[in-house]
């Protein structure tokens, strides 16, 4: 009998792509994962696929989520949702790390009590947002 607290373990069997991205906690719900795959935000080995497409270790999964692209290499497959420590062992993220927060100019933040932005400040903020 398995020890207390042991859940689903990674294996090498094929699993649906929508189930895999949900099981390794890339998406919060299975429905969100399926919708993302249908919308083309999840690609398997560079190709748009259906939610029923099978994933095996060695595949590359690219995910566009929250305005960032993640490039995952599948190391193990799981059928059921697993805890975060186990989920991190199922993939390797090849995406570059985000830039440090102190290097990103923050035009949208103003000092508390500074009031509304002037017309000039508002135009500068809009110009900055269009550039990104």
Image (cartoon, rainbow, N blue to C red):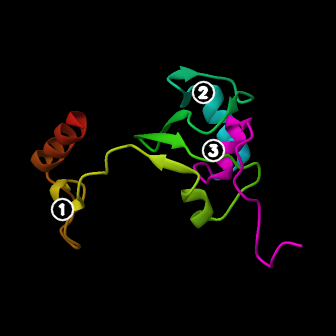
Q: How far apart are marks 1 and 3 (CA)?
A: 31 Å
**Label tally:** 3
Dot placed on the residue nearer the N-terminal end, 2 or 3: 3
Foreground residue among 130 and 20: 20
**Front disc: 2 or 3:** 3
- Provide the major secondary structure of the magenta segment: loop
Q: What stretch is highlighted in magenta?
A: 1-27
The residue tagged with tag 1: helix, strand or loop?
helix
Q: Residue 32: name its quadrant.
A: top right
Dot placed on the residue nearer the N-terminal end, 1 or 3: 3
Which residue: 18% across, 41% down? 128
Q: Residue 71: name its quadrant.
A: top left
Quickly name the residue at label 1. Answer: 102
Which residue: 57% across, 49% down? 26
Indicate left or right for 110 with 64 as reference: left
Indicate yes or no whether the magenta region holds residue 76: no
The local crowd at label 1, few if under 14, some if 14 to 19, many if 20 or more residues have their Cα within 10 Å, is few
Quickly name the residue at label 3. Answer: 21
Note whether 91 is above or below 40 in the view shown: below
Look at the numbered discs 1 and 3 and tell me whether their residues touch, using CB distance below 8 Å.
no
List the single residue furthest toward the left: 120
The residue tagged with tag 2: helix, strand or loop?
helix
Which residue: 63% across, 22% down? 49
Quickly name the residue at label 2. Answer: 39
Which residue: 69% across, 60% down? 82
Residue 80: % across, % down: 76, 53
The local crowd at label 3, few if under 14, some if 14 to 19, many if 20 or more residues have their Cα within 10 Å, is many
Q: Quadrant of the N terminus?
A: bottom right
Foreground residue among 22 and 2: 2
């Amino acid at each position: 009998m398995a020890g207390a607290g042991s859940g689903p373990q990674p294996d090498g069997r094929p699993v649906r792509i929508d189930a895999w991205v949900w099981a390794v906690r890339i998406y919060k719900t299975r429905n969100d994962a399926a919708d993302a795959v249908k919308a083309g935000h999840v690609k398997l080995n560079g190709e748009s696929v259906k939610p029923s497409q099978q994933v095996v270790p060695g595949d590359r999964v690219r995910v566009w989520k929250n305005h960032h692209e993640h490039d995952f290499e599948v190391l193990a497959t799981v059928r059921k949702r697993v805890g975060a420590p186990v989920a991190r062992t199922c993939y390797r993220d090849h995406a570059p790390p985000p830039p440090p927060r102190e290097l990103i100019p923050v035009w949208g933040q103003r000092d508390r009590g500074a009031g509304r932005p002037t017309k000039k400040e508002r135009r500068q903020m809009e110009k900055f947002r269009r550039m990104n």
